[in-house]
Image: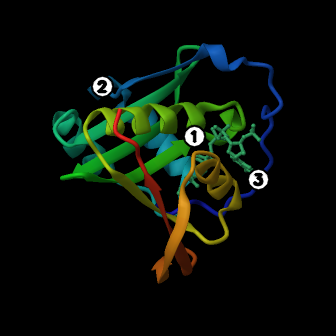
Amino acid sequence: MSASVDSSPRPDASGDASESSILVRPARAADLPRVLEVEQAAYSSPWSGAAFETLLPRDGQGVYFRVGVLDGRVVGHGILWMVQDEAELANLAVEPGFRRRGVARHLLDHLLDEAGRSGVARVFLEVRVSNEGAQDLYRSRGFELVGHRRDYYRNPLEDAQILRLDLTPS
Ligand SMILES: CC(C)(COP(=O)(O)OP(=O)(O)OC[C@H]1O[C@@H](n2cnc3c(N)ncnc32)[C@H](O)[C@@H]1OP(=O)(O)O)[C@@H](O)C(=O)NCCC(=O)NCCS
């Protein structure tokens, strides 16, 4: 994943929405315009609309494409795909104005539950070495550093950390 280096202020990051208003559900075609807006706000090298469109019909067939909905508005998305008993968290993004309200944590927990139920033994992900916020989230869920990929990201050029979580069968 290639996180944006945008560090602009988060105007409503201290808002009082409670986590109970966060819903995670499968993405639908009607969500794609919002997903793309969030993606473009979150990453310096965003995925294309076509990339998300391709994933929609594969949902449940080795791909989990979920959206995070806060007070009825799609504000984040998470994508995990599986290859045999391993999975990769391929995308996790939340719109800047709705961060630090637990949306990413809900998306991640939901995807990890799905992976566990599908018999996945290990989940991998890449994260920019400078992306300490995301790293904190992943560490809080048990991910561990298992390697680096040199110059993995563009825009700007940066190494990736490779993180891994071993799942206990559920
Ligand atoms: C990383 C990202 C998905 C987090 O989304 P979020 O909804 O704000 O995350 P949450 O509110 O669920 O945060 C859960 C925990 O993660 C950690 N965390 C998340 N963002 C953080 C930040 N900017 N600084 C420090 N810790 C952070 C905190 O431990 C946080 O718990 P707390 O708020 O109780 O302290 C979001 O910042 C984003 O979209 N960034 C750009 C894209 C990106 O980097 N994606 C990940 C690529 S690997």
Which residue position is annotated with label 1?
Answer: 94
N-term mark: 3 or 2: 3
| Drawn side of residue 50 relative to residue 21, left or right | left
Pointer 3 residue: 8
Q: Is residue 142 visible?
A: yes
- Is 168 or 102 nearer to us in this picture? 168
Task: Please tell me whether mark 3 sits on a helix, a strand or a loop.
Answer: loop
Q: How is the image coloured?
A: rainbow
CA–CA distance between discs 3 and 2? 30 Å
> Which residue is located at x 63 percent, y 58 percent?
135
Q: Quadrant of residue 34?
A: top left
Q: Residues within 10 Å of mark 1 (few under 14, many from 20)?
A: many
Which mark sits nearer the N-terminus, 1 or 2? 2
Secondary structure category for the residue under label 1: strand
At horizontal 49% and vertical 40% (from top left) the residue drawn is 37
Q: Horizontal and vertical percent for residue 91? A: 43, 50
Foreground label between 1 and 3: 1
Quarter of the picture containing the C terminus is top left
